[in-house]
Image: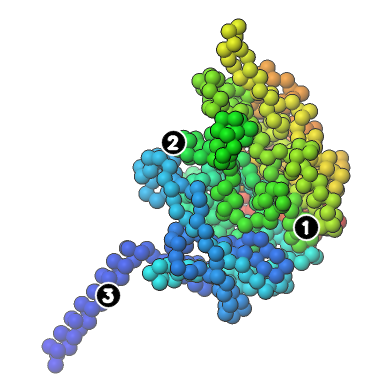
Amino acid sequence: MIARDVMFLSMRRKFYILVLFFLVVYLTLVGVPSWGQGTMISSPQLLTDPFLQLPTENSVRVVWFTEFVGEKHFVVYGEKLDQSAIANTTKLSRTREDQLSRVGKQTENGEVYQQPVKREIWRHEAEVIGLNSHSSVPYYVTSIRKDGEKVNSEVFTLTATPKPEKPLKILLTSDHQLKPMTAANLQKVEETVGKVDGVWFAGDLINVPDRASEWFDDNRGNALFPGLQGRANYTMEYDGRKVTYTGGKIIQNAPMFTCIGNHEVMGRYARTDNLDAEFNDTIPRDVAEKLYGVKDLKSNSFNTDTYEEIFTLPESKTGGKTYYAVTFGDTRLVVLYITNMWRHPQLESSRKGRYVEAEKDLDNPENLGYGQLIYEPVFRGSDQYNWLQKELESSEFKQAKYKVVMFHHPPHTLGDNIVPPYTNPIQIIKRDENGNIQSINYEYPKNADYIIRDVIPLLESAKVQLVFYGHSHLWNRFVSESGINFLETSNVGNSYGAAWGEKERNIPSNYPENDYTRIGDPNGLEPVIPSIAPLVGEDGKALPYIASNDITVFSIFDTGTGTISSYRFDTRKPDSEVVKFDEFMIGDG
């Protein structure tokens, strides 16, 4: 009897050991599933959590990404999670990885990839209908692999576009670009505000738009979607203390409206040996047509294909997703395509610059940079200008309580990137007596600045209350004589400083001050001192800006009160409080 019991225990022990062995093997092969705050397992086989796009009065789009095509993809939703909507699946056409990617096992240049390699990523989008704006509805997404395995997301909430007079909290952000403080910034948004109702993103979401890992899974833990979905894994260190930030669960529950910044525009396709060089390899459309003919001008000049394939946005007849207008609650948001190619400001003869061409390229038009070329015209008489003019005269715009315009390039700022003026470069070619090119320079006359000369007068006439933008990686705001509030709240992930005090912009000494302002706002407005808790400079005076690589900033628009509040968090002090440092109102409150 005893011997039989001992033998039974021995067999049971072997059974448990065998089960444990197979469990370890299984987890080694497929990975350990991560548990989030929702009610379902979140599998790493989904490349992103779902996020919300294009809400209407009774519907909203749900979008997510995988690295497998799958058999079926759908959204499950409803108070009892008893309804479903089938997703439409498409494949991104230009996403790649290269020797400069930080993805998978590649942590140094060229460890895995020696040149750009196609990365297949599938996008799934389902439209959830039959909604109302009075209540939020739980939902999750399911992707079924070809082997039958179901991969589920956590449970989140969605709603239709909000009705007017419903108080909303909207995150104003820009210029994430995988910069060091971004994950901390977004985590503090969620901790400070809770769930927001919408996100307005003023461009520069990533650095190189065709590099897939920058959107989805850069192994440094700071890609765009992980940060906005609370799945970042970015570690910062000060004084020997390491703190890991995860971002915030934001866009799973709130729709995001974006505009194109210079980092959403890709250059000539597959002409160079890495994606950074391809991003910078941009030439004007008319030059491309002369060099290559009319066939596929986008691939031979510049394109926003990946950006447009990733997002479902409102569309205009002339601009498609690149510029549009949408009513969201009490606000009419007008989004413009105002950005240009960023070129280096120094007069180095070895590289393409905003003021000068590299000596090695002077006799080869195909290799010239053509200065800080403007991607989409917005001057008086252009398609975008004419569309804007009609939009500002529309009943949707005029009847909105809040009238907001968002674009990327600053009309007023203390940052570097407002100089030179926003106008097409004037090419100046110097030749020797034999006709050989000696130099190619570019000038940008201030009186031809399209934003100040053409766009702002339209906005003033239409009584726009807020112009929101980014690009210079700092926080500052201005108020014009006509009452327009100008807000740049782009000190999210890092900063490049402010042209204030003794710090001048990097401008060639022979370029005139009246066209190329070295200190202050080139377009004549004085920056506003933060109204609550400004930072103080070394001289003890309050600073009218925040330009820091330690202090990150975000802003929230409360439509219930018409208040825009800006907050700062010192990443050097992980246990410190988030500080509201500025607040102002638009509209009647």
Q: Is residue 245 shown left or right of residue 103?
A: right
Q: Earlier in the sequence, mark 1 or mark 3?
A: 3
Measured from the top left, where is residue 155 in percent x and y? 55, 71
Q: Amino acid at mark 3?
A: Val
Q: Is residue 17 shown left or right of residue 403?
A: left
Question: Can you say whether 87 is above or below 370 in the image?
Answer: below
Which residue is tagged 3?
19
On-image quarter of the N terminus: bottom left
Residue ID at (77%, 57%): 331
Measured from the top left, where is residue 489 in percent x and y? 68, 46
Q: Which sits in the foreground, 65 or 185? A: 65
Q: Earlier in the sequence, mark 2 or mark 1?
A: 2
Residue 273: assigned label: 2
The secondary structure type at the circle numbered 3 is helix
On-image quarter of the C terminus: bottom right
Closest to the camera, between mark 2 and mark 1, is: 2
Which residue is tagged 1?
331
Q: Amino acid at mark 2?
A: Asp
Locate residue 521: give its quadrant: top right
Mark 3 Cα shell of 10 Å, populated few (<14), some (14-19), many (≥20): few
Q: Residue pushed farthest top? A: 433
